[in-house]
Image: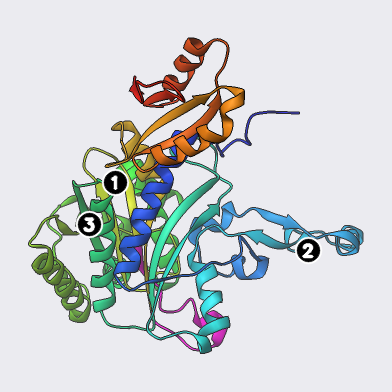
Amino acid sequence: MKSTPVKGTRDYLPEEMAIRDYLQNVILKTYQDAGFFRIATPAIEDAVNLDKSDGGENLNLIFKILKRGQKFTSALDAEEISEASLSDMGLRYDLTLPLSRYFANNRNNLLTPFKVIQMDRVYRAERPQKGRLREFTQCDIDIIGNPSADAEIDLILTTTKALKQIGLSKFQVKINDRRILKSIFSYAGFDEREHERLAIIFDKLDKIGIDGIKNELSEASFPAENINRFITLFESGSLDLSSIEKVCDAEYITSLKYIIDTVNAVTSCSFPVVFTPSLVRGQGYYTGTIFEVEAAGYSGAVAGGGRYDNLIGKFVNEDIPAVGFSIGFERIFSILMEQDYKIPGQKKRIAVFYDAAEYIPALSYAEELRKDYMVSVFERPKKLGKFLNKLEAQNFDGFAVYGQEDGVKIF
């Protein structure tokens, strides 16, 4: 049997889990203090729900679960065999689709607007590489039932506060609106039916650059005139909320200005909020405002989200406004670990050693020490010095031997 974890997943050592637990608890408390309520949904979702969720390229990364027993045998015996006939469930690739199903199923028992927290693992069949795991944790907050841009402001303020609380101080929020992006596509002459395909290609801008986007659009057989007009808009570098008014509805511009101005006023401009017309967000379910957070000195987003006013309607046959913001916990964790992150104010961890005949009083002694320390109790080994070296390597801070008057010794 193999002792290594499956590719794209990983084990966490005790000191890593201590940091992960601390960070997640800080994020959770920040969310709860802002009036959000935590829920949980199953990791497994109906395959049809996953396939119809407008998740963009994530739909190609779903871990499908085979049918079982007679259903699987019957599927194999059928004249035509397909992925859909063999699979009836899959692992969630994000927390938005499960939340939409959850709200549709439970909305009669929920307060609306519903301010909700989800902090859980999700799964994608990624090609394993640095920064790309197949199992990873997301920390989401969403507001369901509020069509106002006030919901976006609430999410931005709460998410950025959580990032600051865990020690990420230098970052910027990038913001756009999917409706503005589609207006730009139309202005360039692209057919509305191609907008989602265009968005998927344009979402690769940070990875392949503007020349790469131009090449992919050409390879996809889009008209050269439209491509050139579109590329010229972004190459000029002059697209801002004022200049873009000529290509889109003033309502979209007004909404973004309101969000940016309000966040700046509340935070005293403690971090930049930047209109970024090239921001896409790959999920196809986004319908309006979209946003990302970028940490200074690191490529890629550490958080992202947007408005998805049509997704819940797939379950209840009526559109219900919704918007969410997700912290990519694994990326945050990696950044902080690279900075040799230490849990602030954490008690020192020590070991208490005892001789076999003194176990009961040693336990009482350890309990007394726990007022000031995190304490593990061990029977004294024959080679105490060698064991102490192991403890120090495992980030213990010191030790005490029950019955000795010198008390706690710090390494």
Whether residue 43 is situated above or below residue 382 in the rendered picture = below
| Marks 1 and 2, how far apart at CA | 40 Å
Q: For residue 167, which numbered disc appears in the image?
A: none
Could you say which is closer to the camera, residue 245 or residue 122?
122
Where is mark 2, residue-wise? 85
Where is mark 3, residue-wise? 173
* Amino acid type for the residue under numbered disc 1: Ile
- Assess whether mark 1 and mark 3 are in contact (beta carbons under 8 angstroms): no
Task: Locate residue 2, reporting x and y percent.
Answer: 71, 28
Which is closer to the viewer, label 3 or label 1?
Answer: 3
Asked whether the viewer can see residue 176, the reply is no
* Amino acid type for the residue under numbered disc 2: Ser
Instruction: Determine whether, in the image, residue 388 is placed left or right of residue 59.
Output: left
- Magenta segment boundaries in residue numbering: 305-321
Which is closer to the viewer, label 3 or label 2?
Answer: 3
Q: Residue at x 73, y 58 (%)?
A: 83
> Could you say which quadrant of the image residue 185 lies in?
bottom left
